[in-house]
Image (tube, rainbow, N blue to C red):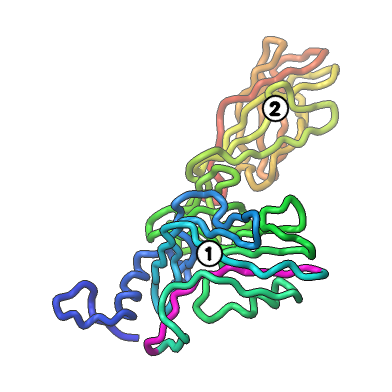
Amino acid sequence: MTVRPGFPAGSGAATFQDIRRSLAGQVVKSAAGVLRTGILPIGTGQLITGTASMVVNVQTCVIVLDRNGAVFLPNDGVQPVQLSSAPSSGSRWSIVYAKQRETEAPFSDAAAGPLIDKVESTTSETAARNLLPAGARELGVWKIDAGVTTTNAASGVTYTETVPYTAMEGGTVLFRNQAERDAWAPHEGSMGYQLDTQRGYEYLGATIGWVHSFGKPEIGAFTSQGIYSAGGSPFRVLGSAGRIAPEGNIVSASAGFTAGDTYTFGSIPAAMAPKTAQIVMGLVNVDGLAEITFTTTGAVTGKFNKSFTGTLNMWINAGGWADKRLV
């Protein structure tokens, strides 16, 4: 590889491949520099929908392909794809895909132009996927069982959306779930938003990984021990923008408590535990205070400033610590 003609430039020397390489710089990439193909999010609804026939409809979207650089393939309306009739027995897998066909070297497709189509197999999903043509971007998989006559049937039809979201460089990549987020290792500083949890993340490299940055906080549940349990406002820890904070209350069965003794109430997830032990104050229902310690393993222990006998109702809603991956 070497320097390529610029685009746009007065010389007009840039070929379509040079332009694609220039456009590739505008799309997010993995840490290895691999362009992330997928769809730019016009919306977050289902991309391909069923109908009262064996047709499926690809909704409006912009598909980003990689054919020696970035290709933006707009679908500016509903694009129908005709699936084959259901098999007489077993199932058939239909994989809907998009492709920009090329007849100009170095490509040698039979025709030129955009294509949204399908490949199918009654053997397996893998067998169908093996039929995808070079340069195709898989969009979704339809599994059609024997006897089905419509793609919107209540049973016998399974649709799996397999095309990921992508974004322009510096933008936020949408993930449907954690599996999609974990499957991508971008360069440091990349941003992502997980749709199922409504949480935003920043990628800080392979060692640290994805760190919560915005949106709803991450929630670490409290695991109680012995006579203790989470109260009416369940005790938990919240992770947000690099900070972990405890909140809620802990209650107990009736017991005797001695001032200065250490009691173990339970634990929080080890991943949300502090790097060094942290002490916060708790308010106790007997007009007293508690010194609450969060250990590096996640254990939650405490001491009371006065002795008492009865049930405990302790509130903890102050203090916090940095995400231990960041310090």
Residue 130 is situated, as x and y percent measured from the top left of the image, at 64, 79
Q: Amino acid at mark 2?
A: Pro
Magenta run includes residue 92: yes
Q: Earlier in the sequence, mark 1 or mark 2?
A: 1
Local packing at callout 1 (Cα closer than 10 Å; few below 14, some 14-19, many 20+) is some
- Quadrant of the rendering where the N terminus is positioned: bottom left
Residue at the location (55% across, 63% down)?
163
**Is residue 5 placed above or below 26 in the rendered structure?**
below
**Is residue 267 placed above or below 28 in the rendered structure?**
above
Residue at the location (21% across, 83% down)?
13
Residue 250 is situated, as x and y percent measured from the top left of the image, at 73, 24
In the picture of the structure, the residue carrying the numbered disc 1 is: 185
Q: Is residue 327 visible?
A: no
> Outermost residue toward the top?
287
In the picture of the structure, the residue carrying the numbered disc 2 is: 234
> Outermost residue toward the left?
10
Judged left or right of residue 137, residue 19 is: left
Residue at the location (30% across, 75% down)?
19
Q: Amino acid at mark 1?
A: Ala
Which residues lie in the magenta part?
A: 90-105
Q: Main secondary structure of the magenta part?
A: strand
Magenta run includes residue 236: no
